[in-house]
Image: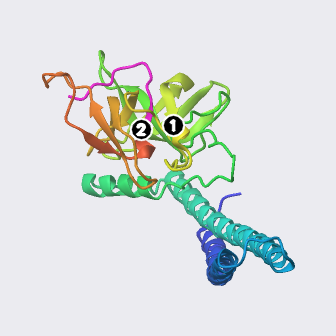
Amino acid sequence: MPLTADVAAQQVQERLRSMHRLIYDIEAERGRNEQCIESILRAEKTAENSPTAEDSGSSQQQMQLKNLYKNGLNAAEQEERVLRAALSRIYEIRAIKNERRIQARHAGNKETIGCGALMKMLLSAAQTLPLHVGRVGERAPPLCGAVPADGGHVARAGDAVAALVRVSDKEENWILAEVVSWLPAQGKYEVDDIDEEQKNRHVLSKRRVVPLPLMRADPRTDEHALFPKGAVVMALYPQTTCFYRAVVNRLPASAADPYEVLFEDSSYADGFSPPERVAQRYVIAIKEGKGRAT
């Protein structure tokens, strides 16, 4: 059932109200956590200044510390639950707005975006891509950072992809595109060139379409979900909507940082361009097909 503008606005408002309440809950939980930490620090300091002999006093101190640690752990877990609930509301709002945008496009209300505005939009999309925040011991899921999609993955309408399209009789390029639909009978995608000035729609086999990451990886917790230094990748060339072959020169230092890559470019003596910064969202595994910066 199509999501009307009024229904979408109502759903967004409901989630915003829920977010408002959750923000107060987060602050309250953070305050409790701070109190727990302060109590633990005081108790540890008292224990350090006490005699080390195993007397009744020291046993009581050890029991008190254990209880404080337990309370601190419970408080931290409760804060995590509230934070994850708030993140869920944010993702729900993103999904609602994306669904409305896709419906507007299908209805023929596709807004023309200038080159400068498009570049800003792509940067914003990369910076606001959800960050994977896993639990202890949890591995980053498919399409988080450099983790590839599952073999049976089918990108959804509105998902960003790299698509190998023919630009002339002898040339093919990897372009940034958006999925319009999946055609199961043909096993093909229908995609739109993200550069709206081109106004091109393509029907492509699955091997010519690479889904872009749906989440960013945090180098501090999920370094395995990043391409290693020296890896050959495809990366979106700055200020363009085309992917080219590149070599990872430096990994992101934080979740907000981009990769530093060297694009293959025969116009330079060593065959590579100077270092360029490319967001995680636009660095993907290498695929066959033309892909050199020109």
Residue wearing tag 1: 146
* Residue 167 seen from this side: yes
Q: 110 or 138, which lies in front?
A: 138
Left or right: 50 as drawn, with respect to 216: right
Residue under the image location 63 percent in, 35 percent down:
154
* Image spot of residue 186 (x, y percent): 62, 24
Q: Is residue 155 above or below residue 152?
A: below
Residue under the image location 54 percent in, 55 percent down:
131
Left or right: 192 as drawn, with respect to 76: left
What span is in magenta?
284-294
Q: Quadrant of residue 120?
A: bottom left
Residue 154 — which label? Answer: none
* Image spot of residue 23 (x, y percent): 61, 80
Q: Residues within 10 Å of mark 1 (few under 14, many from 20)?
A: many
- The amino acid beneath tag 1 is Ala
Query: Which residue appears farthest toward the top when viewing the image?
Result: 170
Q: CA distance from mark 1 to mark 2?
A: 8 Å
Q: Is residue 236 above or below residue 12?
A: above
Secondary structure state at the residue bearing disc 2: strand
Q: Are marks 1 and 2 in contact (CB under 8 Å)?
A: yes
Q: 135 or 172, which lies in front?
A: 135
Residue 283 — which label? Answer: 2
Residue under the image location 32 percent in, 26 percent down:
167
